[in-house]
Amino acid sequence: MFQKILIANRGEIALRVLRACKELGIQTVVVHSTADSDAMHVRLADESVCIGPPPSRESYLNIHQIVAACEITGADAVHPGYGFLSENAKFADILAAHNITFIGPSGDHIRIMGDKIEAKRTARRLGIPVVPGSDGAISDEKEAKRVAAEIGYPVIIKASAGGGGRGMKVAHTEADLEVALQTAKSEAGAAFGDDAVYIEKYLEKPRHIEVQVFGDGAGGGVHFGERDCSLQRRHQKVWEEANSPALNAEERSRIGGICAKAIADLGYSGAGTIEFLYENGEFYFIEMNTRLQVEHPVTEAITGIDLVHEQIRVASGGGLSVRQEDIKFNGHAIECRINAEDPRTFTPSPGTITHFHTPGGLGIRVDSGVYSGYKIPPYYDSLIGKLIVHGRNRVECMMRLRRALDEFVVDGIKTTLPLFRDLVGNPDIANGDYDIHWLEKYLAKGE
């Protein structure tokens, strides 16, 4: 087991990893920018190192500063959390060159899954169902029209190196295709420095289903069930739940088994999430995230297994603590992402939190690094906390969520709490009858 882990992140995920390390008896080091000097994870860590000014590129994305912090403090491993350098293959390679363990997969696996085209090819080779589309990047408009005609309209054009909805455009007819292609390539080049795009069949009313997987790096793999992340705004997840209201036990077992086998065959090490669009009983691979997900607590709630403990155990060479037959699913869990944003316009709302009170009681968990008097800096993601609720079934979970949202108080800034109070009372949400377009349509009606 590691002696000292450096946590290369901030906010709630840094605190989440820190708590896991303390439970395992591992010393902790956190890095922080000057804007985060008073952050909760900085206060609670055994050691902290300031690595630069507020801009991420000069601090949390500064690989040399983070490696230097490891060497100064004697950290023998780095946990990257999510975002920032968590899916940066170069970072993983550099750590390895300095004999520091990256708590995550190999740089090669990060590279494969970070390239959306190569990821799709790999998924197909591993037996994972994929969305019909081009085999690789589209070279020109002529090829785009040929592929689109073969798979049928509507189609979606996606950035190969993309994420977060950038470089994605839908074409409903051939007449739309030229503009969509040019716009997607332009956005991709500006956002990612790579204008390569590919084409897939556009599904009209799919759900976003993702499967949590773990590999031991030695040919073993398991799945921890699925999460439904269909409530999204601009391709950003807002509300996640496990298990999905859309799947039955047979579908759950089938897709979980496919993913576990694939991750084992790949020789993958650590946590990963294989993401799908799901429509009419069929799953279609869209991407794989080679890190811990923001929404991992809902999986922990229904399995009772600490996924960060598993990450650390696997990275240290201890293998997985469970076999597939040991993983049992209990009840239902929902996570709401609480952001420092206006609940209608989603404009960021940095500032000082004057009063912060979290709900409590059976089945309630709040992952947050903020506190009363904390000043939210304007430089980073607006996520300030996650409310996770667990119940014996979905009905109980929804009732408990309604109560928890009523108890949650954040004063001094605007947050998305009012949005969730609206959603929990909506009949479609109560019935689990929604798809990836539902939330944007709902918000449009209210504006």
Image (spheres, helix red, strand yellow):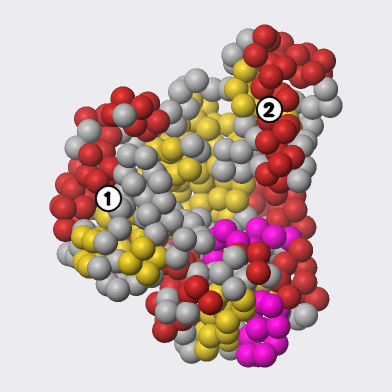
Q: Position of residue 287 (x, y in %)?
A: 62, 42
- At 28% across and 34% down in the image, what residue appears? 429
Frontmost of labels 2 and 1 is 2
Decide which of 177, 138 is in the foreground and name it.
177
Inspect the magenta stretch and tell me whether residue 70 lies in it. yes
- At 71% across and 46% down in the image, what residue appears? 192
Sequence-first tag of 2 and 1: 2
Q: Position of residue 252 (x, y in %)?
A: 45, 40
Q: Which mark is residue 417?
A: 1
Amino acid identity at mark 2: Thr
Quadrant of image for the C terminus: top left
Q: Which mark is residue 183?
A: 2
Judge left or right: residue 239 versus residue 3: left
- At 65% across and 69% down in the image, what residue appears? 58
Q: What's the distance in space between the residues labelled 2 and 1, CA to CA?
A: 34 Å
- At 77% across and 72% down in the image, what residue appears? 94
Inspect the magenta stretch and tell me whether residue 130 lies in it. no
Q: Quadrant of residue 207?
A: top left
- Judged from the image, the secondary structure of the residue bearing numbered disc 2 is helix
Query: Where are the magenta residues, as a range?
Result: 65-89
Q: Quadrant of residue 124?
A: top right
Q: Position of residue 6 (x, y in %)?
A: 58, 80
Q: Which mark is residue 57?
A: none
Q: Position of residue 147 (x, y in %)?
A: 75, 17
Q: Is residue 121 visible?
A: no
Estimate how packed mark 2 is, as few (under 14), some (14 to 19) or many (20 or more) residues with alpha carbons within 10 Å: some
Amino acid identity at mark 1: Leu
Cβ–Cβ under 8 Å for marks 2 and 1: no
